[in-house]
Amino acid sequence: MRFPLRWLREYVDVPEPAEEIASLLTHQGLEVSSVSKVGPEFSEVRSCRIVSVEPLPGSDRLWVCRVDTGHAERQVVCGAPNVATSTGACAALAVPGARLPGGRIVEATHVRGVFSEGMLCSEAELGLSESSSGIFLLPEGIGPGRDLGEALALEDVVLDVEVTPNRPDCLCVVGIAREIAAAKGRRVRLPARPVLEEDPKASEITSVEIRAPELCFRYVARVLVDLRIGPSPFWLRRWLSLAGLRPINNVVDATNFVMWELGQPLHAFDLDRLEERRIVVRRAQAGETLTTLDGVRRSLANEDLVICDAVRPVALAGVMGGQESEIQEGTARVLLESAFFEPRGIRRTAKRHGLSTEASYRFEREVDLEGTLRAADRAAGLMRSLAGGRVLAGAVDVYPRPYSAKTIRFSVSRANRLLGTSIDRSEMQSLLERLSFSVRHPAEDDFLEVEPPSFRPDVREAADLAEEIARLYGYGRIPVRMPVASLAVPVMDPEKRAEEAARDLMVSRGFQEAIQYSFVPRDRIERMGFPEGDPRSRPVPLQNPLSEAQAVLRTTLVSSLLDLIARNLRKNNCDLRLFELRRVFLRREDSDVPEQKRMLAAVMTGRRFPQQWNQPADRVDAYDLKGLLEALFDAFGVSDWDWVGSDENSYLHPGCSGDILIRNSRVGFAGRLHPRLQKELEIQQDVYLFELEFQHLVASRGQGRSYRPIGRFPAIQRDLAFVLNEEIPYREVMEQLRASAAPEAVKIELFDVYRGSPVPEGRKSMAFRITYQHPERTMTDEEVNALQERLLEKVLPRLKAQLR
């Protein structure tokens, strides 16, 4: 909301600079978002009196004017249509050298042989308005020779205030003036509302009927006659423009001025265009339409409150008037509306029709119920002074739901506890009275009885009063007290720490975490093909599922992850690595409460590396899956684990699957997805996955890695290649080598596997590299050879292998 500082100074003394006032309002809860200085966009423009006007010889539209500048007379040639009748009036004269908006410089010149010493300007040429119909005739009281910017008080400061929704009283100049006066301990000068009334009575000309009192609490109508519609005086147009409003004519401008001044939206109807010259406030009827002032024909609903004459709607109550009753150039009689409409109804109507007006903005936040008559009187008196005419005696005031003042019982000690202050009762009373609250002393010393003014509908309880005291007392004056509390370093649950470690590892390996519902469709579990008797095959049903897609509790994480894979593949997102660390729910035979197990599951498919010009396009395979498991168990310090082949997992490929064992106990499974499920899910590429019980992994967690220093002495390497039966797994060979090797064998690694000639069919060649290093001296070849011989003597018979 834009508020010119000169306008504010009409109602309260404000000698302070604008920046100080902006800071004051912001500290009181009304943030001032900007402070803008405004002024004339011209220089060397002065007032002058037109002494004489003569036609320019040889021209039918140019005039030679003699003007008095206060010091001398000048001759100016002008072609404005109103200059011929302006003798004796004061106008705006741009003397030679004057600068006008847009950078235009005025020069002395000859027009058809007649010397012209300047330019008589229109409002548009001075950048004061869009009016260019004639020269700018200055208001009365401005004599010749004055600087125009100073004479018209064009220099001003505009405060742009962000008013919160709970402060409708601050949506007007008087409301902001009240805040400044309260903060500075000054008095507010409310605008006078004298109305010179004349017979007949308004009630003899019009009537008001409210048929929806639940939506319209009060309706005030005043009648003015013999008005002359025309432009508003410059001061009014200037203030409206600075506030962001567009001047229209003297009657409409008066309603907008009072709305910005007092916060009460008003509307002026052409009385002679109202059927039977009366007002009916009711709900709209089915099929009714209304063409609003913006030219849009709107279909009305029964929830809309409308202002009607005896026949039809003429305005959308509290939002916008109608075209059929708007003020026109020939309007002579006006019915002035000032009303209170129920805020929620206005909000619904404005939203339904997509309209947000200055009126609806205020009605939605609640206007002053007791201020409707005051605003109507103020606007009627202003219209009479601007447009002439007469104000008929009395106002038609229909008030079906009168205002009832509420009293709040207020505890001083409780307010101090809320605020952390020690303000005494008399100071609290003084602060509240400065905000126009009525305060009484009950018998108890600790209490006050406070009656908020009608323009403060946001104050409803004692806590609201405490807030009012705090903001006027000054938030900066409230002492800061830090809370006293004992602090202890939180101890993280070991299982939670393990979960974070697992997530970190999976993310570091390029996986993304999936978070999915615990409720799944029954067929998602059935398609996994768990064997009969497997607890995972009998999910726990929900008694009242939201839908069939959330009918049972999941017994495995893999089924949901596979659906996620299929959904991404359909969207051409083909390189996926997903994991989930969540609970599954297994049925118990002896209890209705399912057993909850925390599981870790992962799926991977697509390319091994992101697509790059220098990377091979290899696909992930079982070795990537095994490497992931190795990294996981290594991170948790679990060494006695194994991945043992098994054909019992019907959802996995029989030639590439197995059970995950920890200390010979089955804790999960891993492998490639079965082709049956691939086809059912319409997955066209291999998917590798695992799922294991996370509790077992945490329970088997080691004490951490052990480290040894880097050897100081040279290492010696020896290669061994064994030919052995195809059935003997790598793990068994490695265990035999580690068990048989001397302590000096610090590293044993497989570097080649070969099948084919000359190795016999059914056998394979496995080549290992053994690194020997003594911690205290350099080893000799003879020592290493002896260790190798002893190693072979033990390993070859146990593996039934031959040295290649």
Image (cartoon, rainbow, N blue to C red):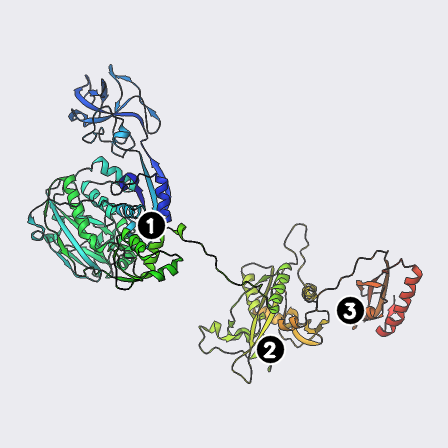
What's the residue type where badge 2 is placed? Phe
Which is more foreground, mark 3 or mark 1?
1
Q: Disc 3 versus disc 1: distance between alpha carbons?
A: 77 Å
Q: Is residue 332 left or right of residue 564?
A: left
Q: Is residue 759 visible?
A: no
- Residue 163: mark: 1
- Residue 718: mark: none
**Element under label 1?**
loop
What's the residue type where badge 3 is placed? Tyr
The residue indicated by pointer 3 is 730
Mark 3, Cα crowd under 10 Å, few <14 / some 14-19 / many 20+, is few
Point out residue 790 in the picture as x, y percentages from the top left corner: 90, 69
Which is more foreground, mark 2 or mark 1?
1
Rendered image quadrant of residue 732: bottom right
What's the residue type where badge 1 is placed? Val
- Going from the N terminus, do you reach mark 2 or mark 1 first? 1
**Element under label 3?**
helix
Q: Is 411 or 78 nearer to us in this picture?
A: 411
Q: Disc 2 versus disc 3: distance between alpha carbons?
A: 30 Å
- Residue 530: mark: 2
Q: Is residue 232 left or right of residue 608?
A: left
Q: Is residue 771 left or right of residue 31?
A: right
Q: Is 338 or 403 nearer to us in this picture?
A: 403
- Going from the N terminus, do you reach mark 2 or mark 3 first? 2
Q: Disc 2 versus disc 1: distance between alpha carbons?
A: 64 Å
Q: Is residue 122 visible?
A: yes
**Element under label 2?**
loop
- Going from the N terminus, do you reach mark 3 or mark 1 first? 1
